[in-house]
Image: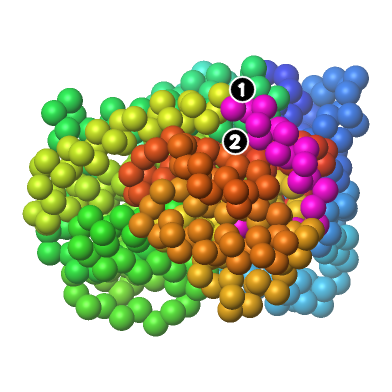
Amino acid sequence: MCGIIGYIGDRDISSVLLVGLERLSYRGYDSSGIAVISSNELSIWKKAGKIQELSRILSGMTIHSNIGIGHTRWATHGVPNDINSHPHLDSSKKFCIVHNGIIENYLELKNELINDGVLFRSQTDTEVISHLISKYYTDSVEEAFQKTIQRLKGSFALSLISEYLPDQILFVRKGSPLIVGLGKNENFISSDINAILNHTKEVIYLEDGHYGSLSQTSLTVFSEKGKKVTPKISSINWNPEDSEKQPYDHYMLKEIHEQPHVVRKIISKYVSNDNKINFTHLNGLDLSNISRFIIQACGTSWHAGLIGKYLIEQYANVVAEVDISSEFRYRRMISHGNDVVLAISQSGETADTLAGIHEAKSHFFPVLSFVNVKNSTIDRESDGVVYSHSGQEIGVASTKNFTAQLTSIYLFSIFLARVKNVMTPEEADKHLNELKKIPEYIENILNQAEKFKKLADKYYLSNQILFIGRGMNYPSSLEGALKLKEISYIHATGYAAGELKHGPIALIDSKLPVVCIAPDTSTYDKMLSNIQEVKSRKGKTIIIATEGNKEIKQYADDIIYIPKTTEDLTPLLVSIPLQLFSYYVALNLDCDVDQPRNLAKSVTVE
Ligand code: F6R
């Protein structure tokens, strides 16, 4: 959450900072700001609203400077207004800070500073940092910065520029991501590679607790204990064009359409021509004696975990529990021996999931993570990793990465079953051969865009929509509801269809659309009864069923068919109509599909 960019070099500073912020804006888009030093003087521009608001106040200006920092905010402390926007200054206006994360002891520090006579301008936790640096400054900005970071509790990434040190950017990474980009006679600091990929592919992923300084031609990094370290340089092979949305109107639509490619890519990464599954980053994790997985994740990744539970239990005969990370991290952890904590995360930076990993490790659980972003914190802190290979996901609502997570968990479950010798090679072949048909099936659904538009036209004015499913498609109903509410702001809830009569059935009347996920599975007959319960209370049924099922049509106000596949693969197909329905509903309502209100792509605060 929140994006930080810093640049020191000869390019046009405002363009480097603004383009960088635009590319970081998926991390938060409540307000943005930049600060530069020119002719030894600090100047700041900041504005509530999206980056375009900031660009507007900067348009027509030529800024002569070769050092600057910028920030895009997801508000935690204080409403999103101009004053609370970053960068933040101290009272002498000599120290300028951008910050990602939360300073947990800020109230205590703020009271101390108020007692010293400091006047605060904003409601943010960040402002204490610039005042503290000012308090500790005698003749070395580096020393004042170091003393300040020792007093801060919480998780944070910071960048500082100061008139007293006009040729350096100071930085620290503690619990929130920060990378350094190395260029020729120029250097960058950023929350992630998106912001700087256009300029350099040589980056340093700073380790937790590391801090240092960056000049136009040099970089100095210290460990948390103050020892000078030589950081490892990584070369990035991402293509900046992956960050473009053309020819689609939105990243979300582009990413929905990338799903057949993503499934094919994952299969090609993990399955050999003779159907052998191989995961290369398990790093020696012994899975043969494993007796329990504890899956922990947030949001859409948690839904993938719920589906993963079914697959792991069914194929590999291993117990799998699933928990929301923000709950898991505070629960007593009881080890039965041979347990593995399995974390799932697209960004690899989600604070709660990461904290769950830390808790698990402190109780000596091995951690296996399913992660999309390579070199992310979760990637680096896990014992073993399975990469989702979905490429860069920019739309805030997760689509292609959900599909990627499901595909890789499906493969992992078969792999585990083979390792544990509870699945024959012939059975594994059958599952894999069916998976290989999925990309084509997804293409088939994507080709029916007109249908989803019509459906959206019919239902977009609904006040609320209920989603129901059973078995593996109960999590699909949760995901369908999450997609709809996050991008269209229509209230939506997912329910296990069997639970309807235990309460939510009271909601049903002639105005309530109910999305009923009812493909051909072992619980189809039960689902059919649940649909009739809805129908007999005059609910409007939007049914997702398997192609060729004519019987179910009589219960449907609207019907969407998906190609026939095995039960275990139905969530992969079901999610596509649900994504497209949400997308077109949100479009009809004029919502900002890629950057829905109040959200951020990477949730790096608790
Ligand atoms: C919803 C969505 C979020 C994320 C959640 C976890 O569309 O994207 O619910 O799934 O914030 O994020 P990751 O997977 O990055 O840990």
Q: Quadrant of residue 563?
A: top left
- Residue bearing mark 1: 244
Residues under labels 2 and 1: Cα distance? 9 Å
From the viewer's side, name the closer residue of 2 and 215.
2
The residue lying at 65 percent from left, 53 percent from top is 541
Expressed as whole percent of the image width and height from the top left, the position of residue 448 reads 59, 27
Q: Quadrant of the C terminus?
A: bottom right
Residue type (three-letter) at the residue carrying disc 1: Glu
Q: Residue 445 appears at what percent x and percent y?
A: 52, 31
Q: Is residue 508 positioned above or below 444 on the image? A: below
Colour setup of the view: rainbow
Residue at label 2? Answer: 394
Indicate left or right for 35 with 267 as reference: right
What is the quadrant of residue 481 in the picture?
bottom right
Magenta stretch encompasses residue 115: no
Q: Position of residue 159 (x, y in %)?
A: 63, 46
Q: How many marks?
A: 2
**Measuring 77% from the left and 77% from the top, which residue is drawn there?**
111
Identify the mark nearer the N-term, 2 or 1. Answer: 1
Q: Residues within 10 Å of mark 1 (few under 14, many from 20)?
A: few
Residue at 17% of width from left, 57% of height from top? Answer: 287
Image location (x, y in percent) of residue 460: 78, 45
> Image check: 7 left or right of 361?
right
Labelled pair 2, 1 in contact (Cβ < 8 Å): no
The amino acid beneath tag 2 is Ile
Q: Which residues are magenta?
A: 448-467
Q: Is residue 396 above or below residue 453?
A: below
- Can residue 353 be seen in this snapshot? no
The residue nearer to you, when weighing 119 against 52, is 52
Q: Tell whether position 462 is magenta.
A: yes
